[in-house]
Amino acid sequence: MYENPVRKKFTFGWKGAFALVAGMIVGTSIMAIVNIFSMFVLKDNLQYTDFYMIIANAAGFLGAIFAFDYLIYRPQTGRKLNFNLSPMNVATYLLIFPMMLGMMFVAEFITAQIPVTGPFFGRYYQFFSDLMRQMTNDRPTLILLAVIMAPLFEEIVFRGIIQGGLINKGVSPLKAILVSSIIFGLVHANPWQFVGGVLLGGVLGLVYYKTRSLLMPILLHAFNNLCSALLIFYGNTESFSKSLQVSEYVVLGIGIVLFSVFYFLFMKKYRIQYSDNP
């Protein structure tokens, strides 16, 4: 009787980082070439169209994922890139979503303390606001980009590849979660989303580490972005406190309680069945 060989695990390092960046550059460059062709031959600039924005976003992330798959993952493991997407039992969802909501409330309060006026922050915030308004002009486009594509692609890259690869390399789980969360915050390229990216990335990383299912951070990420989209659609703001017309300190207090209670239950009171990383 033959024993199953031990499955090799992939690791993440400088070569992996280079593969992700190079793949994203190639993907976005291809779309840029397509747009240049459209501008000079068809006399049509696609840059600010919703369709182009969707395709260009997908091309960048798919380029990064495919590059990591073919240049790093397959040579290291001998198989194609894959992640565990197993659903959890109902109790897990009842713990992680309130915990996520609590951190969203806390992140909102901290983000609100960052200035939006002044010689530096004022101009930067205006540029950032104009960019966000461009993305939110069409609701279906925003839902597709923020609630479907971003959670799927970003969780594959930041939790599945970077965090998972660092842990497989021997980096402590806490440090791996922290590193992936900081990188996740930095790629948003503005201080307002950096804070939320790091804090929420920490929750996403923790949930992924504990459940070993990439489906969980994908769903939580989609939940976070869906809440932001709904606030924009119906309140013209991403602020819970402004939409609910309550003090930001009330939102902070509720957030601390929600996060603390459900973090404790998630970590100490609920026994989670683990499955191996791919």
Image: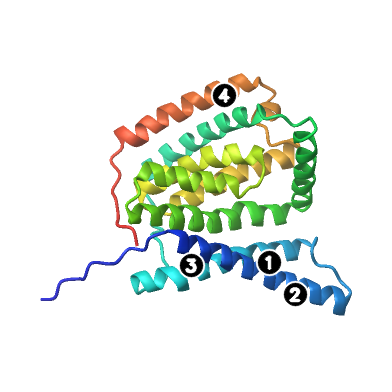
- On screen, residue 210 versus residue 234, left or right, reads left
- Say few, some or many: other residues with alpha carbon within 10 Å of mark 4 (under 14 / 14 to 19 / 20 or more): many
- The residue tagged 4 is 252
| Image position, residue 129 (x, y; %) | 77, 42
- On screen, residue 56 versus residue 224, left or right, reads right
Q: Nearer the viewer, mark 3 or mark 4?
A: 3
- The residue tagged 2 is 34
Residue 266 in view here: yes
- The residue tagged 1 is 55
Disc 2/disc 1 C-alpha distance (Å): 11 Å
Disc 3/disc 1 C-alpha distance (Å): 20 Å
| Image position, residue 68 (x, y; %) | 48, 67
| Image position, residue 90 (x, y; %) | 39, 44
Disc 3/disc 4 C-alpha distance (Å): 39 Å
Mark sitting earlier along the chain (3/1): 1
Disc 3/disc 2 C-alpha distance (Å): 24 Å
Q: Is residue 38 above or below residue 101?
A: below
Mark sitting earlier along the chain (4/2): 2
Tag 4 secondary structure: helix
Residue at 66% of width from left, 62% of height from top? Answer: 57
- The residue tagged 3 is 68
Residue pushed farthest right?
43
The chosen color scheme is rainbow
